Structure formats: structure tokens, C-alpha cells
Image: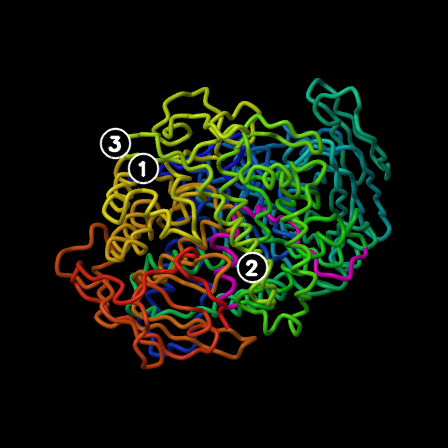
Amino acid sequence: MVGWILASAAAVCIGTTYAQPSPEVQARISAAIAAAQASSRITDIDYTAFVNPFIGTDYTNYGDVCPGASVPFGMVKFTADFTGYAPAGYISDPSQKARGISPLHDSGTGSSLGTYGNFEVMPLLCPSGFDTCTTTLEARERYRKNDSDDAYPGYFSLTLDNDIKMEATSTRRAGIERFTFPGGSKPYFVLDLANDLPASFAGGTLDIDPENGRITIGGYYGSSFGPGSYHYQAFACYDLLNSGTQKLSEYGIWTGDTYGLDAKGLGQTHLNLSQNLIGGTPYQSGALFSYEGNPEEVILRVGISFVSTDQACANAEEEIGTSSFEEIQKASKALWQEKLSKIEIDVVNTPPNVTEMLYSSLYRASLTPNNATLETQGAFANTTSFYFDSLYCSWDTFRTFYPFMTLHSPVEFAQIVDNYIDGWRKLGWMPECRANNLPGWTQGGSSGDSIVAQFAVNYHSEAQALGVNLDDLYAALVADGQVNPPEWNTMGRQVDVYKQFSYVPFAVLDTGSTGRQTREGSRTLEYAFQDFGIRQVAQVLGKTDDVEYYTNRSYWYRNVWDATVYSDGYQGFMQKRFPNGTFYNTDPIDCSPKDTRSSQECSLQEDNQSGFYESSSWEYSWYAPHDTGYLIELMGGDTTFTNRLDHFFDGGYYQAGNEPSFQQTPIGYHYANQPWRSVDRVRDVVMNNFNIETAGLPGNDDQAAMATLLGFHLLGLYPVPSTAHYLIVSPFTPKYTIHNAYLNTSTTVTVTNYSAASVAYPIPDGVPAYVKNVTINGVPAKSRCYVSFYDTFKVGGEIEIVVTEDKTYDCGGHVPESLSMEGFARAR
């Protein structure tokens, strides 16, 4: 999801200088990698020291990464909020001003409005006293000091241009904010009730308890990527006295707007504001307080809840209590070390930039979704299942995020799957893009089907022990595949007409359901692959009739293939189609990087006429991950297929920053038995689109879809979702071990003849990078092109990949499987 208001932003600006956080960040990371390379204690490595949280926080490629303080899958992520385009709150753009620091954020989301940013706190200097403090948003905004931003796992800080330093660390649902003021100044603070990032405030309350030094605050706010009529509730509890070591001086409330209202009530303790029905920007309001004795350091303890202010206070008391900033920070770091050490690489012989990119990617891969278990509301209130928010979005994450999690974290994967199934229990369909505890927009159908299928295929034997009911899982899949919701913009599929016509028809009469009738070509392709996921689970459960039925439905992608369409000398493209069977032809270039028409809409807009979502027919015509062998036949055979794939990249159609390009294209050569070309292409993709700068991502991180794409490339693997198959490419590191604590297995991949010189594009002549042999626990693999999870990472052991400089090798056995060519028999 690149963002449906701000469409694809996949430009890569190589060699351009961007505003950076403190130079000490990179110096610290480089020093840590150098120290690890020089150390003989390879079992005592601090992997958190290799993480750069600022990768993807730029303002040109729109990585939208949140560098804030968080624990793995934390509900809170403390960071500063900035003006301008800043969906994650933070942005590295030095021209933007800080609005304050707040506890709720998402990372890598494509909503151009921003998400969360509730309960901003802004430290102030008010030399003339309470009534002169700049409380309203525009009045209080300040620039930061140059090169002052700092972050590492569990910690965030920056310094404002008035020399006030803001720091934060966190637990799952709480955190500590620490502020350091210039000596001799009186600390003042604004706590904001109404100004969240998307300006969606719809009413709330605030109460100051001066005796106990506590402010409770909560309200209704709007979705960042869903219907504007939906609202969620969020609550916070701010403890101001730091266990009695700080003393309040003044306190009160304030209200304001942008047209002169700037009212303050010294000594007043209560706000109760409804939504301003006349419209316009939200009515601004909040608390204002100061401290006696001019302390240089002020500590605020913060609890967050989606249930109540009482729950928010309880969360702070339970998770932080009287612990110090340093104690919470240390505990957070330990959680991150445990998470990052699930993959251990040969740091000594791996290029430092690869180490930094990999561990930064692994870090972002555990930032979201947000574990909000016990913090449920609406239909999920008091659920007994796990609950995760910010599923941004299933269409983004099924391709790489969950297949990556499959390798090392089945416990967390099972909890998220339980959450998907619970969506079906509560609402009738699994969630597609839940954001802010609300249903978000559907992009390609019910992509959650591919996520739960990925789990069931690989962990069906362990499912019950992991808390997943496979019967419920399959019932949820069938509901997505068979039951048409009355409104399918936020859940489910337009499945009735899909079943009637065997494709999603353009301009169809649908008298039974409502939704945005666009993207007919891409929705057909997505629906077909989702049907493949259902087929896979039916096979696991021994439902023979269903296997046949959903196998046939998974071939319906072929029904939008128009063999008569030409573009750039190539014949045959996916196209949308009328109910009477005729095609509605659009130019395959539409919505590609080569589409020069500024008026062309390509996302969820009602005037998107291309037939595809955030992409072109040139790109989506590769999309049949489960049946690529047949797609090769449609395109005219191996030679035409690989030539066309070359043209797709070299001709400028590939979009590194968008999900449809993730699947199939860089590694598509494997299916034509030319895997060496995939090696070259993946090197091209990585070296020309990713780096360790703030602009180090070619587009939106999309809840770590981009991070896990890069992680797979660096490890020399690529998944086929809803299967147990991982394609073998060529690792960027000579050795790595993946630990699966639940299975009590470790799998070590060793690259014999590895050369760091191969981490380049083009790969220099004579440098070994191309796979000559693959052995699994000493036994030659049946193919050099792919392995099964069951034979490798599930059982543990040793995988040896022997690389050579020879570019002529093939798969040495089976090419990756395709369904119509007797592929994907039941895994185990």
C-alpha cells in the first residue's frame, strides 16, 4: 500500500544528500560492526547495535518508517511528531517543525494523512508565565537542532532548537518520556487532547488530579485508512511527579484555534468537548502545567489503553511502576536482542552495509503489527483471542512478511493468525486492513486468506499446541471465498459475480452488494491466488472435493489474459473484461512508471480506469505465483518469457517500491530454468534501490513488507506464499543461522566460495555468486532452485550452497513448482 492519496513513490535518488539524524548514529553502528568483526567472541554479539532505525525516514522516497521507542510488536511507539508529510509522526526533513512527542504511531504505513499521533506533549519555555505559553499547535511548533536526532532499539531522542532535549523508552503499553531543560529555566508542558496527526478528533475529556499529579485523557478519533465515519477510542494516563521527586507549580487547561482563540484556565482541571459539528479543523484543547524548583530533568510516566483511562493507568503501574528510564530501556533492549538473534550471520566476513541493512530490516519486521491484546473495543471487546491492530495491510504483508515470520517465529505468527480467525468470528470475514482498531480499505480482496494458509501449510501439525483451531481457520477461509459481504470495501470479496463469471467483470450489474467497482483485472488475479491458499489448506485437511474445486478456481487468473494486446513488441496482457466476455482494453503502460499522464488515477479512486491497483498491466501480467509455468506458456515459452522479463526491468516498468513487483519478477527467471539471471537481477534490485541512508528504501515500508523483501534478498531466499517453498538465489553473506526456538531447531546456511566482491551490480567477471550445488544435511537437494521448509528450516541442520562464477547453470533438477504441472502436492 503506497497510499491511495499519494500514489506510488518509487523514485530512487542515488548520490543525493539527504538530511540525516546525528552523525553519531552511523558512527556508533559502524564502530559496533567493526568491533564485532575484530572480536573472537562470536557468541556474544549485541545485534541491537547494528540497527539503524532511521533507514526509511526520508522525505523523498516516502519510506514512512517510525524510529520511535518500541518493544517488539509494541502497542506504543514513542517518537516526535512533525509538520508536513509525516505518516509515522517522525520525518527527517529539516524544514519541518516538531509538534511534540506522542506514544501512538504506526510504522511504514501508506496513509498520507498520517496515523495516530494522539496525546502530544510539547515542552515549553514561558519566561513571562502561564498565560503567555504557546499552547496551540502552530504557536508551539519548533525546529529541532541540527544533527540531534538519535534512536536505537528501545530508545528515541531529539533536541529542539531551544535546547530542550526529549527522550523516550517504552514497554508494550506504556513508556517514560524524559525532558532535559536549559539550566535555570522553568519547565512548562502542553499535553494535547485534540491534535492527532490526521486531525480527526471527534470529542473527548481530560482531567487533572493535582494532588496525585496525574492527568487522564481520552477521546474519539478517526481512521487513517478507512471510512471517515468510523471512530475509535484512545486513552492515556500521565503521571507527573516521578514517584514524588517532582512537584507541580501551575496547572490548568487551554483551548484554541487558528483564528485568534487562545484561552487558558489556570487552576481548572476538567475538559469535556464534543465533536465540532459545523466542521473545519478540530477545536484545539489540552492541559498546561509547570514544575517548581526549575528542575533540569523532568520525567513523565505514560500509560496507554484502548479501553479506558483506568486501564491506561493500570498499564503504566503494571509495566513500569517505579522503574527508572534506564531500567525500562535495558529491558526493551533485551527483548530486541532476543528477537534479532533469531538470525545470526557471519558478521566478520559480511560487508558492513549488508549487516546494517539486514538487522535494520529484522528490527522493522518486529515493529508491527501492534500487539493490543486485552486492549480491545467495538466488536472485539473482551475477546479471549489475541488481538493485533495495524494490519497495514494484508495485501502488503502476505508476500514476504509472514513467510519471513514462518522461518523463526511461529508463536507470534500463531497469535496473529488467531487474531485473523477471530475477525471472522466477530464480523463474518477475516480482516484485510485493520487500522486504528477499525476496518480499513480492501485493496486486492481477502489477502488474509494467503496469510492463514501460509501458517496452516507450514505449522498444521503444531497448530493446536500453538492455539490455532484449524477447523475455524478453514471455516474463515471458506467464508472469504464463498460469502459476499453486503459492503466489500473493507472486508471480504465481491465473490458472487466472481463465481458467476469466473472473473471479476467490469461494469457488472451487482444487485446484492456494494463496493468500489474498479481494479477488476488485479482483483481477479488476487482472488485466484487467494483461492489457491484455500486449496492448500483443504489439501492439508484432506478435503478432496474442496481441493479440486479451489484448484479450478485458482486457474481463473487465465480468464483476464487477452492474447491480442501488444505493447513494446510483446503480445498478451492481463486486461479487465465485460460481463459478456469481451475485453475492455487499456494500454498496458497505464499506471506504470512510464505513464506520463498526470491525471491517471491508479489506486482506490473511483476514476481508476486502468483495471489494476497501484500498478500496470505490464506489472500484474506476471502475477500467478502458484502457476508460473503455465504463465510462461501463455507468454510464448522460456525465451520470450525471459526476454520479456528483461524488458520489464530494463524498459522501466519495474517498481521496486511497490508490492506487485515483489512477487515473481526478480526471481521469475527461476521458472524458465535460468536461475543465474535471477541472481543478477536481485543484485540489481538491492544495489540500486536499498542502502543505509534515511532514503535507503525505494518506497513505503508497508508494515515491513519492504524490510522482509530485503531480508529475503540478503539471505538468498524468496518465498512462494501459501506454500512451504523457498526459492534459492544467492546470499549476500557467507554464513547465517536461523533459530526457531519453538521447534528447538537451528538451520545454518553456508556459502562455499563466497566472495564479498559479489555484493555488487553488475557482479564482476570471475567472482563466484551463482549456485553450483546445494546440499541439505549432506544430501544433494533435488533442485538448485528451491527448497521445502519441511526439509530444511523446520527440522534444522546444515544447508551448503556452493557458488561459482559460471553464469550458465540451470536448476539442476526441478524448476520451482507450478500447480497445473502437478506441483504443490501436500507438504507433509
User: What is the number of the mark on residue 99?
Assistant: none
Disc 1 residue type (three-letter): Thr
Viewer-nearest of labels 3 and 1? 3
Task: Please provide percent x and percent y for residue 613.
Answer: 49, 35
Question: Can residue 18 be seen at all in this image of the molecule?
Answer: yes
Disc 3 residue type (three-letter): Gly
Viewer-nearest of labels 2 and 1? 2
Question: Can residue 174 be seen at all in this image of the molecule?
Answer: no
- Name the residue beneath numbered marker 2: 547
- For this view, does 310 lie left or right of residue 736? right
Name the one closer to the observer, 605 or 182. 605
370 in relation to 20, above or below? below
Task: Please provide percent x and percent y for residue 489.
Answer: 65, 36
Measure the C-alpha gap from mark 3 to mark 1.
35 Å
Counting residues from the start of the chain, the first of labels 2 and 1 encountered is: 1
Which span is picked out in magenta? 382-408
**Helix, strand or loop for disc 2:** helix
The color scheme shown is rainbow
- For this view, does 643 lie left or right of residue 605? left
Disc 2 residue type (three-letter): Val
Task: Please provide percent x and percent y for residue 154.
Answer: 56, 59
Query: Mark 2 Cα within 10 Å, few/some/many (few <14, many 20+)?
Result: many
Measure the C-alpha gap from mark 2 to mark 1.
52 Å
- Name the residue beneath numbered marker 3: 569
Tell me, yes or no, whether the two marked residues, 2 and 1, touch with CB atoms within 8 Å: no
